[in-house]
Amino acid sequence: MSSENEILQKAYDTLVAIDEDGTAEAVAEWISADLDPVTLLNKLAEAMTEVGVRFETMEYYLPQVMIAAEIMNSSSNALSEKMAASGETSATKGTVVIGTIEGDIHDLGKNIVAGMLQASGFKVVDMGRDVPVTTMVQAAKDNNADIVAGSALMSTTMPYLGDIVKLLEGMGIRENHKVMVGGAPVSQDYADSIGADAYALNSHQAVEAAKKLVSK
Amino acid sequence: MLDIINLYQKSVEADKIEEKNFDNRILPKRLNELAKEYDITYNPDEIVPQDMDMVDSMFKAAMELIVDVGIYNISTNSVIKLEESEIKEQLRLLPGEKTYGVGNEKVTVVQRQPGDKRAPTTFGGANGGVISEQYYAKVMESYAREPLASGIHCGSVATLHGMEMKARSPIEMLGARAEAVWTREGMRMAGRPGMPMVGIMSSVTSEGQIFGDGPGAMRPEDMHLLCLLNDMKIDWDCLKKAVNTSQNSLTVDGCMCPIMGGYTGGPATTAIANIAEGIVAYMVFGAASYSICPPFNPMSGEGSSAAPTFVSAHTGAALKRNTKGLYSNYVFPSAGACTEMMIDEIAVYAGAITAGGIDILFGGAGTCGTEVDAYTGMDSRITAEIGIAAAKMSMADMNEFCVELEKTYAPTTTAGNAPKGKKFYECYDLEKVTPSQEYVDLWAKSKAKLTDLGMEFEF
């Protein structure tokens, strides 16, 4: 039987290598050895950080990030079941409801940000593309999200980002959810003009901005 | 052009496939296999095509990609499959030339080849960059006043009567019409009302785009842009636009905006995917021409460094050597107007794709089209003159030129620190619609530098 350190290293190595079966085996071994789930979750989070670094340096591309995020999700679910059985809860950095806004089907940039947020330990509720403002806000409310993140690639869909802020205000829940925006036509000035809490130029900035928002 | 009813039928009758499975597994897996099988690699020291065997291999790989993975319809979550014979039959129908515009400004674009000594055509313009309504017609006039600009690529109208454009709203349709009317007004003011325009950029929906046609606005002889979705995907909106253009005999340009490092991976596999998407655009939209943006880097937003330049130049070379399709390209420097860096970026990107056989240069449009009012006619003068000069150079010399010059700006652009430059109203006389002396002098200085590096200018 493998030692605790060997299983941790196997989990790290296989996740960085995007080896789905290998990570699943390591997680199963960990659970059957009745070891602390939080320790393995932390190691897997380290591996996801490395995946993110490799994406930023173009050693990895989006499919690897997205598959790594899937592996991380299934591993977290398996470990969460174990934790729930023993009355523990798993910690995430926070919950982000993310979507490409109403009218816009250009979701590649949003997918990159979603993958990198997951890689950085956030629980991500990905609403997909062309998401109505009301759906985004309702999802934020239902998931008790810390952050609502909207992207727009077109200047004609960008105004809907401002509607997220307006609807949150209209529903009287603005103080419950931070708003982060991004996308090609969006700028810091535009984010300020609509009352968003953060603007991100790319996935790296989005992760840093999200960390700051949840620490406030 | 493929039969739209047949495309519809295939979409609704095909088995369902989860989109993320197509994106994350099916498409990238096959792309990687094909790159390995055909030994297609990216070499940063060869951004201008030098190895025509590899260029042709890219085309073969692209053909296999279409047959093997098909075209994903996100409206039905299904894949449209095509036989190789169907694709070849469609490619045989491509005309190899196309006429745009009317009257004195009618321009016929005849397919160039890699290394062709004939200069490419330039359609100046903002490439979709956002322009304030008070400057829109003046900016368009600045392009029309450039004799080397044979057409104009529209920008996006920022507001209408002070109100923001909003997709799927009535103002989106009115904005689309305003974009075309104001572009035509700019042409009229310059005495060139028959120039072809490329649009519509102010709307994303099919109803908005279709409303760009009308009296004093888009004509059948203008380039109607029909965009594929990233990557190897379409939706009903794409096909609705194609129904409009085909049923109304409107001139079409198929287009695509790739991303570097996305589902299509790195430079080699992105080039294969771009070629495949070009073939798809010719077939699905009935387009005589296909245009792409440079594959932008998702971290920095830039598209003028070695990797995206490699992709665009090789995509063009492969399509030109193996089809009779026309190929155009969006020149999108990261730096803004009236900067030396913008000129250097145009020299490399437009130079490389000209050597690769490009037919039409769109732009250039500084700041990658992200800043408001950052576009001028002078930018298209620079692009056109560089296109003419680049066509005179051998492909080997062009490569050496591009590799050396790219090194001088790439660290800045890839770090996302390119200078934003000046706005239209800061580097143009708004009454005379002429560039500032500063901008004219800057171009003269840059031309001297580029001449020292091997470019030979006619003007």
Image: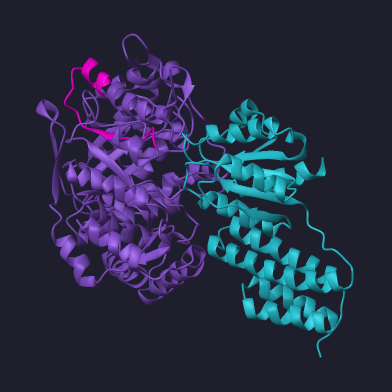
For residue B215, above or below residue A77: above
| Residue B43 located left or right of residue B225 | right
Extreme-right residue of the structure = A87
Which image quarter: residue B149? top left
* Position of A148 relative to B366 (above/below): below
Q: Residue at x 71, y 66 (%)?
A: A47
Q: Nearer the viewer, residue A93 or B123?
A: A93
Q: Residue furthest left?
A: B103
The hue used for chain B is purple
Q: Nearer the viewer, residue B191 or A166?
A: A166
Q: Residue at x 49, y 44 (%)?
A: B302
Which of the colour schemes (rainbow, by chain, secondary structure, one colour) is used?
A: by chain
Farthest residue toward the bottom? Answer: A1
In which quadrant will I find the N terminus of chain A? Answer: bottom right
Is residue B196 found inside the magenta-colored segment of the image?
A: yes
Residue B268: image location, x then y, percent: 41, 63
Res B45 seen here: yes
Residue A173 % position (x, y): 74, 36
Give me the residue at 68% from left, 70% from top. Answer: A74
For the record, the magenta segment spans: B184-203
Q: Taking B290 as reference, is A194 above or below it?
A: above
Q: Residue B193 sits in which quadrant?
A: top left
| Total count of labels | 0
Judge whether residue B325 is colored magenta. Answer: no
Which chain wears cyan?
A
Q: Position of B261 compared to A197: left or right?
A: left
